[in-house]
Amino acid sequence: MRIRVLFFGQLKEITGLAQEEAELSDGAKVDDLFERYGRRFPKLAEFRGSIATSVNQEYADWRQPLETGDEVAFLPPVSGG
């Protein structure tokens, strides 16, 4: 299946990507997608515990299954006060 992947903030800086198309096996979940990028960009994997995810512009759980045409965004930790 083909999905669109978006990176924001410092995650965009780490990967050098604002967006990319990805091919995944049927039944893949958000976590499977992130794991793939974590192997490609090891520094990205360090942020796993503080990254928020969304699927089709709605916050999503790491275990959410993906479908062809989905848009997945990885959102950096928010800082400030």
Image (cartoon, rainbow, N blue to C red):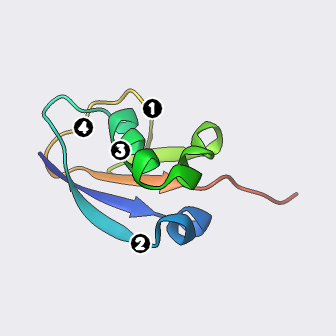
User: Is label 1 in contact with label 2 (beta carbons under 8 Å)?
Assistant: no
Give the SS element for disc 1.
loop
Residue to which mark 2 is pinned: 18
Marked residue nearer the N-terminal end (3 or 4): 3
Q: Amino acid at mark 3?
A: Arg
Give the SS element for disc 3.
helix
Looking at the picture, how far across and down is residue 62, in whole percent?
44, 32
Residue to which mark 1 is pinned: 61
Among the 4 quarters of the image, the one containing residue 63: top left
Residue to which mark 4 is pinned: 66
Q: Is 67 displayed left or right of 47 in the figure?
A: left
Among the 4 quarters of the image, the one containing residue 22: bottom left
Marked residue nearer the N-terminal end (1 or 2): 2
Q: Nearer the viewer, mark 2 or mark 4?
A: 2
Res 56 visible: yes
Q: Nearer the viewer, mark 3 or mark 2?
A: 3
